[in-house]
Amino acid sequence: MFIINCPYCGERDQTEFSCGGEAHIERPKQPTELSDDQWAEYLFMRKNIKGVQFERWNHAHGCRKWFNMVRDTSNDKIQAVYKMGEKPPVK
Amino acid sequence: MSKNLRINKNNFIDQTTRISFKFNGQKLFGYKGDTLASALLANNIHLVGRSFKYHRPRGIMTCGSEEPNAIVQIGNDPSFTDPNVRATEIELYEGLDASSQNCWPSVNFDIGGINNFLSPLLPAGFYYKTFMWPASFWEKYEYFIRHSAGLGKSPTKSDPDIYDHQYSHCDVLVVGGGISGIISAKLSAEKGLDTILIDDKSFLGGSTIFQENECYKINSVNSNKWLANEIESLKNYPNLLIKNRTSLAAFHGYNYLLARENLTDHLSINERKGKVRQRLWKIRAKKVIIASGSIERPLIFSNNDRPGIILSSSIKKYIDYYGVKTGENISLFTNNDTAYETAISLYKSGVKVNVIVDIRKNSDSLIVKEALDLGLKVLWESTVVDTQGYKRIKSFEVMKLSDDGNNVVGDRSKYNCDCLGISGGWTPMVHLFTQSGGKLKFRNDDNVFIPDENKTPSNQISVGSCNGEFKLNEIVVNTIENLKSFLSLSNSCYDGIKIICPDEKSKRNIWLLPSDKPIGKTKPFLDFQNDSTAKDVKLALREGFKSIEHVKRYTTTGMGTDQGKLSNMHALGIIADTTGTNMGELGTTTFRPPYTPLTFGAIVGRNVGEFFDHTRKTAIHNWHVKNKAEFENVGQWKRPWYFPKNGENMHQAVQRESKAARDSAGILDASTLGKIDIQGTDASEFLNRIYTNTWSKLEIGKCRYGLMLNEDGMVYDDGVTTRLGENHYIMTTTTGGAANVLSKLEDYLQTEWPELDVYLTTVTDQYSTISICGPNSKKILAKIVPGLDLSDNNFPHMSFKNTKISNVNCRIMRISFTGEHSYEINIQSNYAEDVWIKCMEAGKEFNLTPYGTETMHLLRAEKGFIITGQDTDGTLTPSDLQMDWIIGKKKFDFIGKRSLYRSDTIREDRKQLVGLLTEDPKEVLEEGAQLVENINKKPIEMLGHVTSSYFSPNLNKSIALAVVKSGKKLKGKKLIVPMENKNINVTITDTVFYDKENKRLNA
């Protein structure tokens, strides 16, 4: 059970949040120009990393804001949280 | 048989307060402070249960939570009875009524004991191997297997006890109240940290508190006296909370821990009334100190499971703490010095140990010397090879070990006894450490897994014997030193502490002791509860199992209620020895929470009954209740299902309601539909992107039905959205989808389109919705809002008006989910019931009939309107639903658009929504029933299934919607719905059954 440092509210219990999967997958600007394969790549393909993973989280039972989080899935250490649209502070 | 084995000497039991209890119907006595186990032993009762598989007689083996055998059923009340309670943990109380489990007709004479003689036929994996074929027989086997499986009996009535949950935040949590835990708590409290100390026993001090031995001194006093003073001094710290009878169940990441506090289980039944039975603590600690101690290992030799065979440290606790002799002719069997402490304790209490069998060649430790000085007889370099006695050990046989310890030599010599203490060394309790994510390392010197300090999660530390420190001086000095850095202390109240203790030098470990008989002829038990033996483990290895996790599941070693606390290590050791692997490389099985079993009551706490889940009620709910509605759960909402009159059943009520709605007028509480207020200069653009159809041209004051897809092109939700102003819309969603739709829209707004100026607000609870439909709905509305021009010209279908009902602002939409001329009144929820009653009064002359969800479903099915989630299941595109008209083909993009022409979504043989009519118009199909074409060609191809089905009173025939492969092309085709007893002939039709021309909308 993590403690997540919401960039808007501060440290809160994990039960207040929901995870929205892999981060930094941008919705294609012109989907009509993509082939089936390219669209499928956007639609279905997600990484499932053992190690440092970039994730989207939502403070669902708090401020309802979405933000990004860098988490090491092997030990659940949260390395960073940052707002939507911001560049990840770690690599 | 009945004897009193209590001695009068100790300080821990209140021998002035006698407590009566029952065991297997026999009335017995113990004292305040006893556990059930100590009280039974004082009455010379060892046999308490039967083992799981072979039904062998089993006795009390330990004095704590690791007990595999002495698990009993408490009470026989169908609400309060408690199975699988460890006799070694339950405190004695007046009226305690315990009985043995897993035996019939009684623990003394158990029919299942026959399994013991059949044991050669019941090897590891017996059930897997035997009951596999013929496969069709499994259901028959299962009946018998289920009856013979399981230990205690579950209560059959609901639990009337009260359970609590409590959150707690602290600076430091100390787990375990033994000597290292006490030192830790004091150091933490001394520093001023907010500290919690928990221990699962009723008393603090662990095993040191009854270590009355001159060999152990701290600052020149006996260690037990010193510790008692320390415990006393803890009272001086207001920042230290001590919780006894509290067992740590789970240690999760980020120092989140669960602990169960027992509050009434030790009280007499009369004292429990109205009190909370157990409290589950949810603790978030900045730092955690694990001082969970260690437990003694048994030794693995043939017939090592007989009643009267007890861990030697437990014998010591029974005599030193409870003042109970576990026998009158006790011998000990050991591979280390612990047994000698027991022998000395027994000697001081007037029990001379007959003989100590020691597998070591010798020992020159102080404690052994003391025992020898007392004249105790030791058989060095010897092992017990077998024991005798069915319901209580009578004798054991000893042989000399060979030099390498792999064999026995010479002859057997036999010793009589009524109790044999066994001591196989110590296992650190690393469960909590590994639960938290810590990794173990193996210490070859004494064969223990201990926390790897380099792989310990931050902000926690293990101290004392759970960290692999077993000598008093190591425990105390290292605990103090390690805590100084862990808690950043520059100095401590313990600086300069002086400790005297004996030093154990020689250790010898043999996982499976040798015998003069081949292993097949012996019964060396590993897991006492699940009856797995060393030969089962060896068999599993021969059969090709390699992973320790597989061996565990195949042999069931470590899978009982005790989770193998006692002898998992031996199983690992034997696997390592047999396969020639190092135990460190082999690793352990995974330690999972809870450490000891939790009651369901503790897990759910107060979240039972009406508190189990939220119930949402509409503002008109009370009226529905008064008018005898039957309710249906839709998500968390209670929705009127139907309103039975004069003893009608559901079918009759729904037929009447449906007919009334079309003949004259019906009224529905539609308040549960999700309502999202959308505002902002980009609101129209936003709707364009999330709905399949076009919104920018919708006039102010008009409504439009919209279909929302997932990005994969599948229908997700639908509803009507109304344009209230230039930059203001109100969207309705399905009842169940409301929260998810809002989340999804917020997600796109915040993450994909942050440039859009749009604000979303949920107003589902703020507005109530009353829907009036039917040919007379206009007349009824005219009575309620007399000033409003209801002509089709001024107020056409799919438009809305702002108006007032008795000075209360409301929005009236002219929209229809039934196909009838119909209005939806949206009004602030606190006026909703009033308005509803006004509608009912105005509608009286028109037989305005309240109807529920079932009639709503029927009416919309007559019109072929879908319900997302009933007719759709996340695999249907708009085209599959024959709703191509709603796709804005000219739109540049919307959620899911690109997916609508993927190779899979344009397949023509996808399942598509169709209507069905039955050959016999009275025959109503079952929803979910399968559709096939040819019943004779096997395997029969499943073409689809029925999604909605009703008897329509307005058409006087059965109608259904279904999804069918290539359904769009199959109009007029005859299919079969095969049911259990008959085949029903159906014909594929259009999805609209009633008023295809939509004439009634303007009727």
Image (cartoon, rainbow, N blue to C red):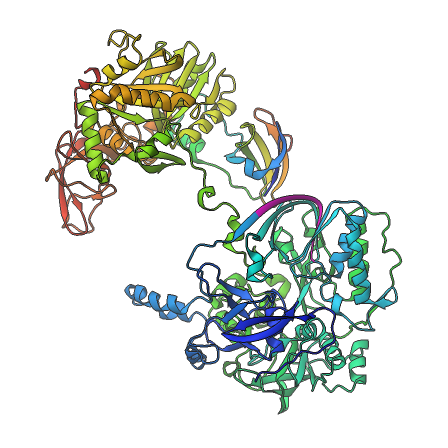
Tell how many labels. 0
On the image, the x and y values in percent for residue B794 come to 27, 7
Nearer the observer, B301 or B908: B301
Report if residue B965 is visible in the image. Answer: no
Q: Quarter holding the C terminus of chain B?
A: top left
- Residue at 79% from the left image edge and 62% from the top image edge: B227
Identity of the residue drawn at 46% across and 71% down: B102
Q: Which of B548 and B563 is in front in this view?
A: B563
Q: Is residue A2 left or right of residue B883?
A: right
Where residue B464 appears, as percent x and y from the top left, is 74, 60
Where's residue B148, x and y in %? 40, 70
For the N terminus of chain B, give its image quadrant.
Answer: bottom right
Tell me the residue at 66%/83% (across/down): B330
Residue B79, quarter of picture: bottom left
Residue B676 in the image: x percent, y percent?
A: 43, 22
In the displayed structure image, the side of residue B536 where residue B132 appears, left or right: left
Magenta stretch, main secondary structure, is strand
Q: Please indicate, yes or no, whether residue B541 appears anywhere in the rendered image.
A: yes
Queried whether the magenta region covers residue B169, the answer comes back as yes
State whether residue B49 is above or below residue B231: below
Q: Relative to B147, is B765 above or below?
A: above
Q: In this view, does B486 lie to the left or right of B91?
A: right
Residue B863 part of the magenta-drawn span: no
Left or right of B655? Residue B893 is right
Q: Give the range drawn in magenta.
A: B165-176
